[in-house]
Image (spheres, grey):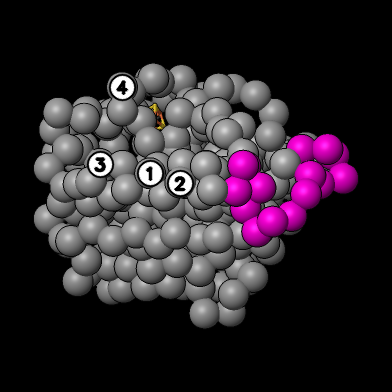
Amino acid sequence: MSATGLLVNVAATRVGTRALGPGLRSVLWVQGCPFTCPGCMSPQWIPDRRTRLVTPRELASELLGDARVTGLTLSGGEPMAQADALAEMVAHARAARDLSVLCFTGYRLERLRADPPNPGVARLLACVDTLVDGLYVAALDDGRGLRGSRNQRVHRLNPRAEEAGTDFEEGPRSVEIALEGPTALLVGVPPPGLLTAFDTAVDTVRALTGGNPGGRGPGPDGRQPRCDQGRKRECDGTDGQR
Ligand code: SF4
């Protein structure tokens, strides 16, 4: 428990990626989102349920696990739903290293300022350099940029030199697929067709291994190993994202 008693409900993390913002970044996906956008790539991270509860200080340390990381990307789930804890995490991280912060939110910036959903929002907004706002609309996904659909807006709240050359609206998309044991994590905003290819690959692994990628047996908890942006999938068919 942190000194303030705050905890972050973590869906997933990725330390060191070039797929979600300028430079080498660490990504935090939080668990829980008040929205239900059709076509959301991380539906398993929408339910407001406990996953991994971590103190802001511990989470900052985890995200700074690679000394080359120069930025944090906050996604989910809905980061603004855990604004106070995330602001505290960013403060801890920045106490150790100068970092840019990119944040995705389903809320519009005007709403966050005029009628914040919780008291921590202003504190988190003060930490964010670039905010991508608005709900994902599948019909407006033009396959370009670091926003999921073209209704979403990019707000440079605190422009940094590192981000000056990044075209958040129109730049090419890239993704990374991180394999950690039997889990496959898709990191990034997928270009057209990529999500289907990813799902097909995971389904193929499941079919070929009987939900047992790598030929390993069930873990100590009796569960089969798993294969799985944020989109995280489980090769044993147990998947439940932004
Ligand atoms: S796209 Fe983002 S805002 Fe919409 S349901 Fe998914 S996580 Fe929530």
Question: Which residue extends farthest bottom?
Answer: 68
Q: Mark 3 points at which residue?
A: 148
| Residue at mark 2 to residue at mark 4: CA–CA distance | 25 Å
Label 4 sits on a secondary structure element that is: loop
In which quadrant of the rendered view does residue 111 lie? top left
Kindly indicate whether the residue at mark 2 contacts the one at mark 1 (C-beta within 8 angstroms).
yes
Going from N to C along the chain, the mark reached first, 4 or 3, is 4
What's drawn in magenta, residue-wise?
A: 209-223
Q: Mark 2 points at which residue?
A: 204
Task: Tell me where residue 184 appears, x and y as whole percent.
Answer: 53, 52
Q: Quadrant of ligand 1?
A: top left
Going from N to C along the chain, the mark reached first, 1 or 3, is 3
- Is residue 218 located in the magenta-colored stretch of the structure? yes
Question: Which residue extends farthest right?
Answer: 220
Q: Mark 1 points at which residue?
A: 200
Closer to the observer: label 2 or label 4? 2
- On screen, 37 above or below 206? above
Residue in front for this viewpoint, 91 or 51: 51
In which quadrant of the rendered view does residue 37 lie? top left
Q: Name the residue under label 4.
A: 38
What residue sits 28% from the left and 73% below the top?
A: 161
Residue type of the residue flagged with mark 2: Thr
Q: How crowded is mark 2: few (under 14 residues within 10 Å), some or many (20 or more)?
A: some
| Residue at mark 4 to residue at mark 1: CA–CA distance | 20 Å
Closer to the observer: label 1 or label 3? 1
- Is the CB–ligand 1 distance for label 3 below 8 Å? yes
Task: Tell me where residue 216 appears, x and y as whole percent.
Answer: 74, 55
Assign the N terminus to one quadrant of the image. top right
| Residue at mark 3 to residue at mark 2: CA–CA distance | 26 Å
